[in-house]
Image (tube, grey):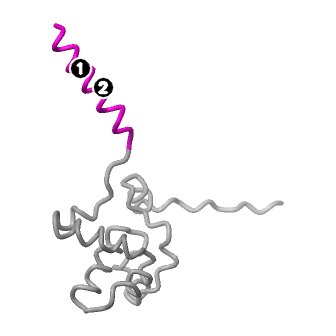
Amino acid sequence: MPQRTRRSRPDPKVEALRVDGALNRHADQITDSLFGAHEFFDARDLVQVKYEMLRRVEIDAQPITPTAAAFRLSRPSFYQAQRAFQQRGLAGLLPKKRGPVAALRKARKSEQVDRNIL
């Protein structure tokens, strides 16, 4: 009799991170010692990864280039995260919504034209 393979259930946190656009595709490549040392530090969570990267530089006084590399992010990504965090706090590290911005603008402009005609 052939052996059945059991399908594992999808992790609800991974699915939530994916839906929110915050799933870190390079989670397995992070080399910072915090990730892997305790389950609280989840390398799959891109917001947490960015925050910990900023903390390493700001609080632990680590240099930017090797720190960004340990978190599998680029220097420009570090500076973008730093600026976003300074301007908006933790909310600044959340991924921006993606979508057809141009189409939305056209729809709004069309609504405005319709109102002007009526």
Say left or right for 66 vs 55. right
Say left or right for 53 vs 86. right
SS label for mark 1: helix
Say left or right for 89 vs 16. left
Residue denoted by label 1 = 111
The alpha-carbon separation of the residues under discs 2 and 1 comes to 6 Å
- The quadrant of the picture occupied by the N terminus is bottom right
Q: Are marks 2 and 1 in contact (CB under 8 Å)?
A: yes
Residue drawn at point x = 25 percent, y = 72 percent: 82
Q: Dot 2, crowdedness within 10 Å: few (<14), some or many (≥20)? A: few
Residue denoted by label 2 = 107
> What amino acid is found at the position of numbered circle 1 in the picture?
Glu
Q: Dot 1, crowdedness within 10 Å: few (<14), some or many (≥20)? A: few
Residue drawn at point x = 16 percent, y = 7 percent: 118
Coordinates of residue 103 in the picture (x, y in percent): 36, 31
Coordinates of residue 43 in the picture (x, y in percent): 42, 75
Q: Is residue 99 above or below residue 104?
A: below
Coordinates of residue 33 in the picture (x, y in percent): 41, 90
In reply to whether residue 107 is colored magenta, the answer given is yes
**Residue 47, picture quadrant:** bottom left
Residue drawn at point x = 21 percent, y = 67 percent: 90
**Residue 61, picture quadrant:** bottom left
Residue drawn at point x = 17 percent, y = 67 percent: 89
In reply to whether residue 87 is colored magenta, the answer given is no
Front-lying residue, 85 or 112: 112
Q: Is residue 74 above or below residue 102?
A: below
Which span of residues is magenta-colored? 99-118
